[in-house]
Amino acid sequence: MRLTGVSAESVWTGLSVTTTLTNPSTRPGLRLPGRVTLAAGGGDVPVRHIRLGLVAQVEPADPGGPRRLVQYHQVPIAGRFVVPAGRRRAVDFAVPLPWETPVTIFGGVPLLSLRTGLRTEVSVDPDLDQGAMVPVFVHPLPTQQHVLAALETLGFVMRQAGLQQGRLPGVEQSLPFHERLGYWVAPLYAGPITELEVIFVTNPAGLEVLLWMDRRLSLAGVTHQSISRFRVWHADADRRDWIATVDGWLRHAINRHAAAAAHADWSATINESAHVSRHPDVPVAPGYGLGGTAGGGGIGGGGGGDGT
Protein backbone atom coordinates (compact mmCIF):
# COMPACT_ATOMS: atom_id res chain seq x y z
CA MET A 1 0.00 0.00 0.00
CA ARG A 2 1.61 3.26 -1.12
CA LEU A 3 -0.09 6.58 -0.37
CA THR A 4 1.15 10.15 -0.50
CA GLY A 5 0.06 13.40 1.06
CA VAL A 6 -1.85 11.90 3.98
CA SER A 7 -2.65 14.60 6.54
CA ALA A 8 -4.69 15.41 9.62
CA GLU A 9 -5.75 18.84 10.86
CA SER A 10 -6.50 20.08 14.36
CA VAL A 11 -8.02 23.51 15.04
CA TRP A 12 -8.55 25.39 18.26
CA THR A 13 -8.73 29.07 19.25
CA GLY A 14 -6.06 31.09 17.52
CA LEU A 15 -4.17 28.27 15.81
CA SER A 16 -4.68 25.46 13.31
CA VAL A 17 -2.24 22.56 12.99
CA THR A 18 -1.93 20.28 9.95
CA THR A 19 0.35 17.24 9.87
CA THR A 20 1.18 15.79 6.46
CA LEU A 21 3.17 12.65 5.70
CA THR A 22 5.10 12.59 2.45
CA ASN A 23 4.54 8.83 2.26
CA PRO A 24 2.74 7.01 5.11
CA SER A 25 4.02 3.60 3.93
CA THR A 26 7.21 2.65 5.74
CA ARG A 27 9.11 -0.14 7.49
CA PRO A 28 10.61 -0.59 10.96
CA GLY A 29 13.95 1.17 11.37
CA LEU A 30 13.30 3.76 8.64
CA ARG A 31 12.52 7.46 8.90
CA LEU A 32 8.99 8.76 8.38
CA PRO A 33 9.16 12.15 6.60
CA GLY A 34 6.54 14.86 6.68
CA ARG A 35 5.63 18.39 7.71
CA VAL A 36 3.69 20.12 10.48
CA THR A 37 2.11 23.40 9.37
CA LEU A 38 0.78 25.89 11.92
CA ALA A 39 -1.44 28.84 10.97
CA ALA A 40 -2.25 31.67 13.39
CA GLY A 41 -5.52 33.59 13.47
CA GLY A 42 -5.95 37.19 14.55
CA GLY A 43 -3.14 37.27 17.11
CA ASP A 44 0.41 36.06 17.63
CA VAL A 45 0.57 32.50 19.01
CA PRO A 46 3.54 31.50 21.19
CA VAL A 47 4.34 27.80 20.82
CA ARG A 48 6.29 26.03 23.56
CA HIS A 49 7.10 22.84 21.68
CA ILE A 50 5.99 20.37 19.03
CA ARG A 51 6.34 16.64 19.57
CA LEU A 52 5.36 13.68 17.40
CA GLY A 53 4.35 10.32 18.83
CA LEU A 54 3.59 6.87 17.42
CA VAL A 55 0.37 5.46 18.87
CA ALA A 56 -1.31 2.04 18.74
CA GLN A 57 -4.07 0.05 20.45
CA VAL A 58 -2.53 -2.39 22.95
CA GLU A 59 -4.11 -5.27 24.84
CA PRO A 60 -3.33 -5.27 28.58
CA ALA A 61 -1.39 -8.02 30.34
CA ASP A 62 -4.63 -8.85 32.17
CA PRO A 63 -6.77 -10.76 29.63
CA GLY A 64 -9.95 -9.29 31.09
CA GLY A 65 -8.90 -5.66 30.68
CA PRO A 66 -9.85 -3.37 27.79
CA ARG A 67 -7.50 -2.36 25.02
CA ARG A 68 -6.01 1.09 25.41
CA LEU A 69 -4.24 3.63 23.24
CA VAL A 70 -0.50 3.62 23.96
CA GLN A 71 2.05 6.13 22.72
CA TYR A 72 5.16 4.01 22.34
CA HIS A 73 7.61 6.43 20.70
CA GLN A 74 7.91 10.21 20.94
CA VAL A 75 10.24 12.64 19.15
CA PRO A 76 10.54 16.44 19.70
CA ILE A 77 10.76 18.36 16.43
CA ALA A 78 10.62 22.02 17.55
CA GLY A 79 11.16 24.17 20.63
CA ARG A 80 9.83 27.65 21.44
CA PHE A 81 8.81 29.98 18.63
CA VAL A 82 6.00 32.40 17.75
CA VAL A 83 3.56 32.12 14.85
CA PRO A 84 2.72 35.75 13.89
CA ALA A 85 -0.91 36.75 13.45
CA GLY A 86 -2.26 35.74 10.05
CA ARG A 87 0.93 33.86 9.17
CA ARG A 88 1.99 30.25 8.76
CA ARG A 89 4.97 28.32 10.07
CA ALA A 90 6.07 24.96 8.65
CA VAL A 91 8.28 22.45 10.47
CA ASP A 92 9.71 19.57 8.45
CA PHE A 93 10.52 16.28 10.17
CA ALA A 94 11.85 12.77 9.57
CA VAL A 95 10.81 10.61 12.53
CA PRO A 96 12.96 7.48 13.08
CA LEU A 97 10.81 4.39 13.62
CA PRO A 98 11.88 1.88 16.29
CA TRP A 99 13.04 -1.46 14.92
CA GLU A 100 10.27 -3.11 16.95
CA THR A 101 7.53 -0.98 15.38
CA PRO A 102 4.60 -3.38 14.83
CA VAL A 103 3.88 -4.44 11.28
CA THR A 104 0.36 -3.47 10.17
CA ILE A 105 0.42 -4.38 6.44
CA PHE A 106 1.33 -7.66 4.73
CA GLY A 107 1.04 -8.16 0.99
CA GLY A 108 -0.67 -4.78 0.68
CA VAL A 109 -3.50 -5.89 3.01
CA PRO A 110 -4.03 -4.63 6.59
CA LEU A 111 -3.26 -7.23 9.26
CA LEU A 112 -6.77 -7.59 10.65
CA SER A 113 -7.41 -4.92 13.31
CA LEU A 114 -3.81 -3.72 13.72
CA ARG A 115 -3.42 0.04 13.30
CA THR A 116 -0.79 2.62 14.17
CA GLY A 117 -0.77 6.37 13.79
CA LEU A 118 1.33 9.50 14.19
CA ARG A 119 0.01 12.03 16.68
CA THR A 120 1.11 15.67 16.80
CA GLU A 121 1.40 17.35 20.19
CA VAL A 122 1.54 21.17 20.16
CA SER A 123 1.99 23.02 23.44
CA VAL A 124 0.60 26.56 23.50
CA ASP A 125 0.33 28.27 26.90
CA PRO A 126 -1.78 27.29 28.73
CA ASP A 127 -3.10 24.57 26.41
CA LEU A 128 -1.73 21.26 25.19
CA ASP A 129 -3.32 19.95 22.01
CA GLN A 130 -2.64 16.40 20.85
CA GLY A 131 -4.48 16.80 17.59
CA ALA A 132 -5.75 14.21 15.14
CA MET A 133 -3.71 11.14 14.22
CA VAL A 134 -2.31 10.49 10.78
CA PRO A 135 -2.44 6.78 9.79
CA VAL A 136 0.92 5.08 9.26
CA PHE A 137 1.18 1.85 7.24
CA VAL A 138 4.07 -0.29 8.46
CA HIS A 139 5.20 -2.94 6.00
CA PRO A 140 7.42 -5.86 7.09
CA LEU A 141 11.17 -5.89 6.76
CA PRO A 142 12.41 -8.41 4.16
CA THR A 143 13.23 -10.97 6.88
CA GLN A 144 9.74 -10.59 8.37
CA GLN A 145 8.19 -10.69 4.90
CA HIS A 146 9.96 -13.97 4.10
CA VAL A 147 8.84 -15.64 7.34
CA LEU A 148 5.22 -14.56 6.87
CA ALA A 149 5.20 -15.64 3.24
CA ALA A 150 6.69 -19.03 4.14
CA LEU A 151 4.03 -19.64 6.80
CA GLU A 152 1.35 -18.80 4.23
CA THR A 153 2.90 -21.13 1.67
CA LEU A 154 3.10 -23.94 4.23
CA GLY A 155 -0.63 -23.63 4.81
CA PHE A 156 -0.97 -21.56 8.01
CA VAL A 157 -4.02 -19.27 8.13
CA MET A 158 -3.89 -16.12 10.24
CA ARG A 159 -6.76 -15.91 12.74
CA GLN A 160 -5.80 -12.84 14.78
CA ALA A 161 -3.21 -10.09 15.17
CA GLY A 162 -2.68 -7.85 18.15
CA LEU A 163 -0.29 -6.00 20.42
CA GLN A 164 0.22 -7.41 23.92
CA GLN A 165 1.36 -5.28 26.85
CA GLY A 166 4.42 -6.61 28.69
CA ARG A 167 7.83 -8.06 28.01
CA LEU A 168 8.83 -11.55 26.95
CA PRO A 169 11.05 -13.63 29.24
CA GLY A 170 14.70 -13.69 28.24
CA VAL A 171 14.21 -11.43 25.20
CA GLU A 172 15.72 -7.97 24.77
CA GLN A 173 12.95 -5.49 23.95
CA SER A 174 12.89 -1.72 23.57
CA LEU A 175 9.09 -1.32 23.50
CA PRO A 176 6.69 -2.04 26.39
CA PHE A 177 4.63 -4.44 24.23
CA HIS A 178 5.08 -7.07 21.54
CA GLU A 179 3.16 -8.01 18.41
CA ARG A 180 1.46 -11.43 18.27
CA LEU A 181 0.26 -13.00 15.04
CA GLY A 182 -2.04 -15.97 15.67
CA TYR A 183 -2.50 -18.80 13.15
CA TRP A 184 -4.62 -21.90 12.77
CA VAL A 185 -2.21 -24.77 12.31
CA ALA A 186 -1.53 -25.96 8.77
CA PRO A 187 -2.76 -29.50 7.92
CA LEU A 188 0.83 -30.69 7.44
CA TYR A 189 1.62 -29.96 11.11
CA ALA A 190 -1.76 -30.70 12.71
CA GLY A 191 -1.96 -33.19 15.54
CA PRO A 192 0.79 -32.23 17.99
CA ILE A 193 -0.40 -28.61 17.95
CA THR A 194 -3.66 -26.78 17.26
CA GLU A 195 -2.60 -23.13 17.18
CA LEU A 196 0.55 -21.13 16.58
CA GLU A 197 1.48 -17.60 17.61
CA VAL A 198 4.41 -15.87 15.91
CA ILE A 199 6.28 -13.01 17.60
CA PHE A 200 9.00 -10.90 15.94
CA VAL A 201 11.61 -9.00 17.96
CA THR A 202 13.84 -6.99 15.65
CA ASN A 203 16.98 -4.86 15.90
CA PRO A 204 19.30 -3.35 13.25
CA ALA A 205 21.23 -6.60 12.77
CA GLY A 206 18.67 -9.36 12.91
CA LEU A 207 15.31 -10.83 13.68
CA GLU A 208 14.37 -13.08 16.56
CA VAL A 209 11.34 -15.27 15.86
CA LEU A 210 9.36 -16.83 18.70
CA LEU A 211 7.00 -19.70 17.92
CA TRP A 212 4.46 -19.98 20.73
CA MET A 213 2.38 -23.14 20.52
CA ASP A 214 -1.10 -23.69 22.00
CA ARG A 215 -0.97 -20.70 24.38
CA ARG A 216 -4.73 -20.13 24.38
CA LEU A 217 -5.54 -23.81 24.96
CA SER A 218 -3.08 -23.86 27.85
CA LEU A 219 -4.77 -20.87 29.46
CA ALA A 220 -8.05 -22.78 29.20
CA GLY A 221 -6.47 -25.81 30.91
CA VAL A 222 -6.80 -28.04 27.83
CA THR A 223 -3.12 -28.67 27.18
CA HIS A 224 0.34 -27.18 27.74
CA GLN A 225 2.16 -24.44 25.84
CA SER A 226 5.74 -24.04 24.64
CA ILE A 227 7.93 -21.31 23.18
CA SER A 228 10.84 -21.90 20.80
CA ARG A 229 13.21 -19.15 19.69
CA PHE A 230 15.11 -18.76 16.42
CA ARG A 231 17.31 -16.03 15.01
CA VAL A 232 18.27 -14.86 11.54
CA TRP A 233 20.29 -11.91 10.30
CA HIS A 234 18.97 -9.32 7.86
CA ALA A 235 22.01 -9.71 5.57
CA ASP A 236 21.60 -12.10 2.67
CA ALA A 237 17.94 -12.70 3.53
CA ASP A 238 17.05 -12.93 -0.15
CA ARG A 239 19.45 -15.85 -0.70
CA ARG A 240 17.98 -18.11 1.99
CA ASP A 241 15.57 -20.97 1.33
CA TRP A 242 12.83 -19.65 3.57
CA ILE A 243 10.39 -22.52 3.10
CA ALA A 244 13.02 -24.99 4.31
CA THR A 245 14.11 -22.65 7.10
CA VAL A 246 10.64 -22.09 8.53
CA ASP A 247 9.71 -25.75 8.07
CA GLY A 248 12.82 -26.70 10.05
CA TRP A 249 11.90 -24.26 12.83
CA LEU A 250 8.38 -25.66 13.01
CA ARG A 251 9.48 -29.29 13.13
CA HIS A 252 12.05 -28.58 15.83
CA ALA A 253 9.49 -26.62 17.89
CA ILE A 254 6.77 -29.26 17.45
CA ASN A 255 9.15 -32.03 18.51
CA ARG A 256 9.93 -30.13 21.71
CA HIS A 257 6.25 -29.45 22.26
CA ALA A 258 5.36 -33.13 21.85
CA ALA A 259 8.24 -34.23 24.08
CA ALA A 260 7.08 -31.85 26.80
CA ALA A 261 3.57 -33.28 26.56
CA ALA A 262 4.87 -36.84 26.91
CA HIS A 263 6.97 -35.81 29.90
CA ALA A 264 3.96 -34.18 31.53
CA ASP A 265 1.96 -37.39 31.15
CA TRP A 266 4.25 -39.42 33.42
CA SER A 267 5.37 -36.65 35.78
CA ALA A 268 2.38 -35.33 37.68
CA THR A 269 4.58 -33.00 39.70
CA ILE A 270 5.60 -30.89 36.71
CA ASN A 271 3.61 -27.70 36.21
CA GLU A 272 5.29 -25.84 33.38
CA SER A 273 3.64 -22.74 31.95
CA ALA A 274 6.18 -22.35 29.15
CA HIS A 275 9.34 -23.99 27.79
CA VAL A 276 11.79 -21.65 26.07
CA SER A 277 14.15 -23.33 23.64
CA ARG A 278 16.89 -22.27 21.33
CA HIS A 279 17.44 -24.06 18.07
CA PRO A 280 20.84 -25.79 18.27
CA ASP A 281 21.90 -24.29 14.96
CA VAL A 282 20.79 -20.78 15.86
CA PRO A 283 22.37 -19.75 19.19
CA VAL A 284 20.78 -16.75 20.87
CA ALA A 285 23.45 -14.54 22.40
CA PRO A 286 22.89 -11.39 24.49
CA GLY A 287 24.07 -9.15 21.62
CA TYR A 288 23.77 -9.43 17.88
CA GLY A 289 27.28 -8.25 17.09
CA LEU A 290 26.57 -7.53 13.43
CA GLY A 291 25.82 -4.32 11.61
CA GLY A 292 23.00 -3.73 9.19
CA THR A 293 20.85 -0.91 7.92
CA ALA A 294 17.45 -0.74 6.36
CA GLY A 295 17.12 0.21 2.75
CA GLY A 296 15.29 -0.70 -0.36
CA GLY A 297 12.47 -0.54 -2.50
CA GLY A 298 9.69 1.99 -2.82
CA ILE A 299 8.80 2.15 0.83
CA GLY A 300 12.22 2.98 2.10
CA GLY A 301 13.29 -0.47 2.51
CA GLY A 302 14.71 -3.22 4.67
CA GLY A 303 18.19 -4.21 5.43
CA GLY A 304 19.98 -7.39 5.54
CA GLY A 305 21.10 -10.15 8.05
CA ASP A 306 22.50 -13.57 8.16
CA GLY A 307 21.05 -16.63 9.79
CA THR A 308 22.39 -20.05 10.51
Image: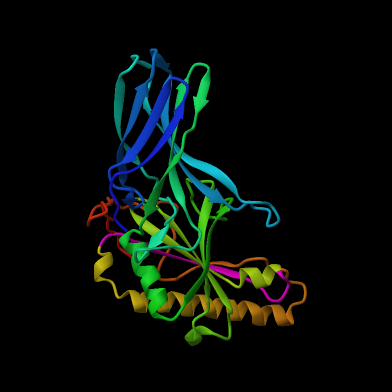
Can residue 308 be seen by looking at this rendering? no
Q: Is residue 129 above or below residue 110?
A: above
Q: Looking at this view, name the residue that lies furthest to the front.
A: 42
Relative to 22, 168 lies left or right: right
Residue 264 in view (yes/no): yes
Of 159 and 285, the residue lying toward us? 159
Find out whether residue 70 is within the magenta segment: no
Residue 151: image quadrant is bottom left
At a point 58% along the width and 80% down the height, the residue shown is 193
Q: Residue at x 59, y 79 (%)?
A: 194
Q: Which colour style is shown?
A: rainbow
Whether residue 64 sits left or right of residue 139 in the image: it is: right
Give left or right: position of 160 versus 222.
left
Q: Which quarter shows the C terminus?
A: bottom left
Q: Position of residue 219 (x, y in %)?
A: 69, 67
Foreground pick, 246 / 18: 18
Residues shaded magenta:
220-235
Q: Residue furthest right?
A: 268
Tell me, yes or no, whether the highlighted magenta stretch contains residue 233: yes
Where in the figure is residue 161, as x and y percent of width and height? Answer: 51, 63
Number of numbered tags placed on the structure image: 0
Give residue 241's quadrant in the image: bottom left
Relative to 121, is 236 above or below? below
Residue 196 percent location from the top left of the image: 54, 72
| Place of residue 93 in the rendered image (x, y in percent of width and height, measured from the top left) | 30, 34
Name the residue furthest left: 297
Quadrant of image for the N terminus:
bottom left
